[in-house]
Amino acid sequence: LGALTLVYVVGELSHFLLGVVTTPMSQELHYGDHGCLSNPELGPQDTPQEEVYCYEGNSSDVCVDLWVSPSSNKSACVWDYSGLGLEYQLLAGPAFVAVFTVAGIGMGFLSDSYNRKVVLCCCLGALVLATTLMGAATHYWQLFLLRMTIGAGESAFTPTASSVLSDLFPQTVRGFALGVFNWGIYLGYGLSYIIGNYVTAANILGMGWRWSYYITGLLGLAVLLVLLLILQEPVRGAMTA
C-alpha cells in the first residue's frame, strides 16, 4: 500500500510541477504571454518606500517606469514572459489531460489482461524518464511531447493500483486502503509547491527550475526500485467473497 501510494505521489508531483515553475521555464524557453513582473534582481537597498503593484503595468514602457531605484537605477518591475497564456494552457490542459483521459481506458484494459506489476512499473518508468527530460528541454515542442508522455504514464496508476489493492485487501478494509492510496493526489500536489519553489530558488549549479524536474525524476526512480523489489502480483480475485 505504501509503495503504491508513493507511485501516485510521484505522478501528481510530476503533473503539477509545471504550474509552479512555468514562469522561470517560459523565460528561458520563450513561450506564453508577456507580463509585468517583480524584478528578482532588486536588492534590499532598492526597496521602494511604498508598495509597487507590478500587475498594473499593462505595457513594457509602463511596467519599467512604475518605480525606479534612485540608488541603482533598477526598475522594481520587469516586462518578461509570465509563463501563462495559450501555450501554457496547452501544456497544462490538452497535452496532459487529453492523453491521460484516452490512455486511461487502454491502461485499464491492460491491467485486466496482463501482469499489473509489469504495467505499473513500465508506466512509472516512462513517467520518470519524461519528467527528468523535462528538466533538459530546450524547446517548447519538447515540453509538449514530454507532457503527453507524463499523462500517458500516470493514466495507468489509478486503474492498475486499484485493481491490485482490491486483490490485496478484503472488503472490510478495502475502502480504507483506497483512501490511503488517494492521499497521493494531495501529497504530490503539496510537494510540487515545495520542490518547485525552493529548489528553483536554490538555483543549483545555476540551473534553476531544471533541478526541480531532476529531483522529481530521482524520487520517481527510487520509488520504481522499491516497487520492483517489494510488489508481488497478487492472485486475481483472491479477496472476492
Image (tube, helix red, strand yellow):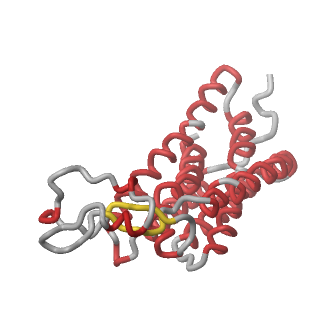
- Which residue is at a point 81% across and 34% down the rendered structure image? 237
Q: Where is 66 relative to 236, above or below?
A: below
How far from the left and from the top, in percent, is residue 122? 71, 62
The number of numbered badges drawn on the structure is 0
Quadrant location of residue 148?
Answer: bottom right
Instruction: Give the side of residue 224 with respect to residue 170, left or right.
Output: left
- Which residue is at a point 58% across and 59% down the rendered structure image? 85
Q: In the rendered image, which quarter contains the N terminus? A: top right
How far from the left and from the top, in percent, is residue 176? 60, 26
How far from the left and from the top, in percent, is residue 123? 70, 59
Foreground of the two, 67 or 9 = 67
- Which residue is at a point 19% across and 51% down the rendered structure image? 50
How far from the left and from the top, in percent, is residue 166? 72, 33
Instruction: Give the side of residue 89 with respect to residue 135, left or right.
Output: right
Quadrant location of residue 41?
Answer: bottom left
- Which residue is at a point 65% across and 63% down the rendered structure image? 147
Instruction: Give the side of residue 213 with respect to residue 54, left or right.
Output: right
Foreground of the two, 128 or 15 = 15
